[in-house]
Amino acid sequence: MSLQETTFTYGPNQFAKRPTPLIGWGLFSLQHFEPGQELFRIPVLDLAHGTIVPFENAFDQHTAECCDNGLTLFRTHTFCVNEQQPFRYVNHACNANIAFDEWGHLFDDAIRVIAIRPIHPEDQLLLDYTYLTAYYDGSSDGQAWEMRCACGAENCRGVISGFNRLSRSDQELGLLKGWVIAHMANDEPDLIAWFKATRPDLYARFEQALAQQLTYSERLSTRRVS
C-alpha cells in the first residue's frame, strides 16, 4: 500500500483514499458492489464525521473549508464533512456509480450511500454533485455554484451547477431514482407536480423524506439537536 493511501472500513465494506492524476484525492472501492447495495453511511449528527453549521455561516472565514466539503442536507444548515468521513474524497462524474438513497432520507440520523451501477474492486467511487447542490449553494447571499467538469464521460455536461439547471430529463431521472435531496427537488414545483401525478407511490415516500428534512431544519434552528 502507498504511504499516501488511507483505508476506511464500514462493517464488511472497505475503501481506500488515494491520489488521482487530475483532481487530488479520490475514494476507491476495494470490493464488488451491486446496484442498490449500501456502501457506507454519513452520520450527520456525529461530530466524529463533521459538523453542522447554519447555511449562512458555511462561507465564513473560520469555516471556509466547508465551502468545498459541505453538503446542504437541510435547507437551513450545511454539514461540513471532515477527514474521517470517506464521502469527503468522493469526486464528481456526470456518469456516476454511487448516489444518495431515498432522497437523502435519514436512517438512524445517517444518509445511506448506495451503488447505482456495478462497482468492481479498484473502481473509483463517483457521484453526480448536481443532485446534491441547491440553486443557492454558491455563496451566503444565494449565488449559483459552478464547477468545470473533466470527467470525460460521453454525457459530460462540461460545467456542473445546481439541480435547478439540469435538463428536465435528468431532473426526472434523479427524482424517480431518489438520488436528489428532497428539499432541493421541492424547489421545482412543476417537476414535483409531474412526480406526484406520475408516481404517487414514490411521491408518498418522497414526502416522508422531505418532512424529515424540514423537521431537522426546525430542530437545528432552535438548537434542540445535540
Image (tube, rainbow, N blue to C red):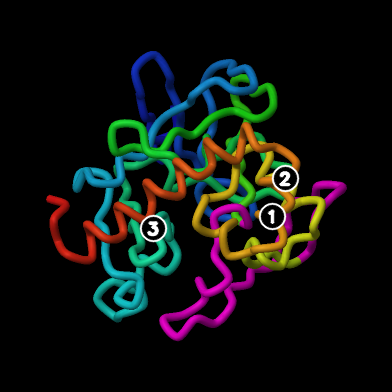
Read off the residue under disc 1: 193
Residue at 49% across, 34% down: 113
In this picture, which residue range is highlighted in magenta? Answer: 130-158
Q: Identify the element where label 3 is drawn.
A: strand
For marks 3 and 1, give the CA distance.
22 Å
Read off the residue under disc 2: 197
Q: Identify the element where label 2 is drawn.
A: helix
Residue at 61% across, 41% down: 126
The image shows residue 112 at horizontal and vertical percentages of 44, 33
Read off the residue under disc 3: 74
The image shows residue 146 at horizontal and vertical percentages of 63, 72
Quadrant (top left, top right, bottom left, bottom right) of the N terminus: top left
Q: Quarter of the image holding residue 175? A: top right
Residue at 35% across, 32% down: 107
Residue 134, magenta (yes or no):
yes
Structural crowding at the residue carrying mark 1, measured as other residues with C-alpha within 10 Å and reported as few (<14), some (14–19) or many (≥20): few
